[in-house]
Image (cartoon, grey):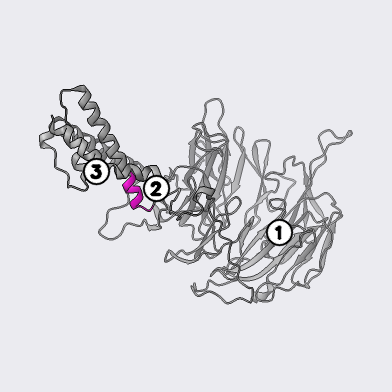
Amino acid sequence: MVILSLFFPLVRGSEGLYMVNGPPHFTESTVFPRESGKNCKAYTFSKDGTLFAWGNGEKINVISVTNKGLLHSFDLPKAVCLEFSPKNTVLATWQPYTTSKDDAAGIPNLQLYDVKTGTCLKSFIQKKMQNWCPSWSEDETLCARNVNNEVHFFENNNFNTIANKLHLKKINDFVLSPGPQPYKVAVYVPGSKGAPSFVRLYQYPNFDEPHAALANKSFFKADKVTMLWNKKATAVLVIASTDVDKTGASYYGEQTLHYIATNGESAVVQLPKNGPIYDVVWNSSSTEFCAVYGFMPAKATVFNLKCDPVFDFGTGPRNAAYYSPHGHILVLAGFGNLRGQMEVWDVKKYKLISKPVASDSTYFAWCPDGEHILTATCAPRLRVNNGYKIWHYTGSVLHKYDVPSNAELWQVSWQPFLDGIFPEKAITYQVVPSDVPSEEPKVATAYRPPALRNKPVTNSKLHEEEPPQNMKPQPGNDKPLSKTALKNQRKHEAKKAAKQEARIDKSPDMAPVPTPQSTPRNTISQSTSGDPETDKKIKNLKKKLKAIEQLKEQAAAGKQLEKNQLEKIQKEKALLQELEDLELGI
């Protein structure tokens, strides 16, 4: 059994590299002696958290977290990326690609080491840092790399023999499915010369048959894609992005969200609000996913596997979503250029648990126990107010560390654990007590020009906020309409209203008499005198009375009127009398 205080947040910064004991102690751990200095460029835990590797600018060291012993030390002073294979068999390291006079092809810069013996299994040339690490299946039976627009597969960590190849013209990216056999792979091929981009799903090793693909989805608007498998490897979500939005609506390009299932089904996920797609994340149950999208204030919606909306969280200042490891809690947050507001939701009841604020945060991570949250402000994204906080999901800060003003924090992360180590606990809505004094976030007031500073404040909103709503069809209720159906319904209603207005215009005698609301509305009627000069005067008087009516409505809504506007309202009686005299003379 794993005791809660045994997992470690790990901290890397200008003060060095060190581990901290997890809740409830938060003291510096003795498992890993502090590595002082600023030379640590990379570190990584194994998937089960039992091994830890880091680089100190001279060597890559590997230790066992459980018995604190040094396992290996590799002479790799330039290594900047480290990764363990899923079962801790292989350590992958990457350093920047270089060439020499003697070897124009370049020096192999991707090394794969046997963790048990410390020997180098294989070295490859990997020019780009992006997607540098090979992808393993969870049982390590399969390993894959993207090499010269084709995917090379190795079996049982034998890197001297390519067991299989997936060749398509200009493969840009691929993602290996999680979980056990049969293994599946999603590949992306960008479009060219008028041909669309596409994502295809294959089952290993069936690549060469005419209809080998499990599913295929093509689309034109895509300069790059992000592919997200669900945990059960039954479906992939594809976020297709363009670098430039040709409509000019967004600075960040244009995004679309596509759903592709291994049974061949595919669909475009219809998002009810226009704008960028900030984040998409699968629930660990693999039966639903959450998307954060739309121009600010952004919407967040949970969809099922039919791409139908299940729950709409309304609008708010958010650009990220994070499911807890057990999938029972969802955090919607606004980080980066937003103020750091978080909404913590109970996913089963769709009930709000807490609304903490983590100001200036650049990093968020759930603890493997599904109860604690880590937020941090790190350099170089922000070079001031660096530090980290450990929260309980009910909103209380359990531990806080602020880096001194002359130092920087570069990276913080939890020690990982395998699924099932921490059982799911019942959700509590009662705030967990904490010794850390609570900080009230500073409320930024809106700018008011000097002329308005001594006058009453009027409540005005830039955007209408939409409240959360359950999108599941209730018993006896119709299924919620799709985006296309809603659009058609609005068109039909608009046509119906236009026909009604046209009918009223043709037969004014048949027009329904409006309920009297105010004197100006009763007096403003359509009439002609036959004298163009009189008609012009009547038209001008009606225009003035309409403006006065609008001013009165603004005053009733609480708006502070100017002196000249108040004087206009005082003239209403005289204008009405003048209008009446002119109309009686008709």
Residue hosting label 2: 561
Say whether residue 2 is visible. Answer: no
Label 3: element kind: helix
Q: Nearer the viewer, mark 2 or mark 1?
A: 2
What's the CA distance linking mark 2 and mark 1? 46 Å
How many other residues sit within 10 Å of disc 2, few (<14), some (14-19) or many (≥20)? few
Position of 133 with respect to 242 (left or right) is right
Residue at 31 percent of width and 44 percent of height: 569
Residue closer to the observer: 393 or 1:
393
The percent coordinates of residue 305 (x first, y second) are: 43, 52
Question: Relative to 241, does residue 399 appear above or below in the rendering?
Answer: below
Question: Relative to 39, does residue 100 appear above or below in the rendering?
Answer: above
The percent coordinates of residue 475 (x first, y second) are: 28, 61
Residue hosting label 1: 386
Amino acid carrying label 1: it is: Asn
* Sequence-earlier tag: 2 or 1: 1
> Magenta span has 553?
yes
Amino acid carrying label 2: it is: Leu
| Residue 571 numbered mark, or none | none
> Which contiguous range is marked in magenta?
551-558
- Total numbered labels placed on residues in the image: 3
Q: Main secondary structure of the magenta part?
A: helix
* Sequence-earlier tag: 2 or 3: 2
* Sequence-earlier tag: 1 or 3: 1
Label 1: element kind: loop
Question: Relative to 81, does residue 356 appear above or below in the rendering?
Answer: below
| Residue 573 numbered mark, or none | 3
The percent coordinates of residue 446 (x first, y second) are: 53, 52
